[in-house]
Amino acid sequence: MSARIGAVIACLALAACKVDARNDYLGDKSPKQFGLGHVASAAEIAAENIDVSPTGEGLPPGSGTPEQGATVYAGACASCHGANGEGKSPAYPQLVGGPRGNFNFASDFKIPRTIGNYWPYATSLYDYIRRAMPLTAPGSLTPDQTYAVTAYLLNREGLLPAGTNLDAKSLAAIVMPAKAHFVPDDRRGSTGGKNVR
């Protein structure tokens, strides 16, 4: 037992020496900062602050039609998601054409979760495409291209008429068929004993 205690003490002593040597190397026994990074500028923050809320807050200026989106989709999306949004199993999901109506994802895990039967907000579709697609170059689509691809996919799901010019206002006004399947998260957290909404 005493051999184990001795080994633990030796390990702690070595660790303390290592930390002390690192601090000596840095020239300070208790550094307040390590000289890494910099204060982000307003422009850097704005470039990263691209989230879009369900209400459409955060959508950029721009617009696009389903017809324009068909061209962008063919060049940037079809290689993974298929020419018609049918997906390429197993890695690339089906985007359009899933079942509608009375069904339960929990009862059959094979039911494809598509834009029309699973996404609660059209603005979330824009947000996801803007941030994560195309897979090989996320964030490379312009706002107009992103509106156009969003319009194309919504049109393929029968949620946006052909020829419609989709922009921030019209996108936020679209009510998705699956919206009723989701409920707001109304849990309350606690910060310093105060409820946070």
Image (spheres, helix red, strand yellow):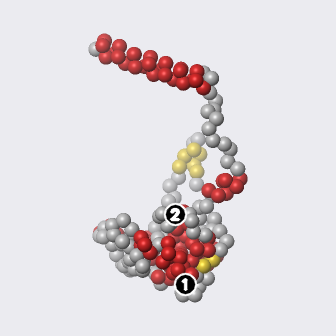
Residue located at (62% from left, 23% from top): 27
- Local SS, label 2: loop
> Residue furthest toward the top?
2
Q: Is residue 148 left or right of residue 91?
A: right
Q: Amino acid at mark 2?
A: Ala
Between residue 39 and residue 76, name the one nearer to us: 76
Q: Is residue 5 left or right of residue 150?
A: left
Does residue 169 sit above or below 15 in this rendering? below
Q: Is residue 178 visible?
A: no
Between residue 114 and residue 117, name the one nearer to us: 114
Does residue 141 sit above or below 185 in this rendering? below
Percent position (x, y) of residue 78?
Answer: 44, 75
Q: Is residue 6 left or right of residue 134?
A: left
Q: Is residue 140 visible?
A: yes
**Mark seen at residue 58:** none
- Local SS, label 1: helix
Callout 2: few (<14), some (14-19), or many (20+) C-alpha neighbours within 10 Å? few
Q: Quadrant of residue 58?
A: bottom right
Residue located at (67% from left, 71% from top): 61
Does residue 51 sit above or below 172 in this rendering? above
Q: Quadrant of residue 33?
A: top right
Percent position (x, y) of residue 71?
Answer: 53, 80
Residue located at (57% from left, 49% from top): 195
Instruction: Name the image quarter holding the N terminus.
Output: top left
Give the foreground label among 2 and 1. 2
Percent position (x, y) of residue 85?
Answer: 42, 77
Q: Amino acid at mark 1?
A: Glu
Instruction: Name the image quarter holding the C terminus.
Output: bottom right
> Residue furthest toward the right?
42
Residue receiving disc 2: 137
Residue receiving disc 1: 67
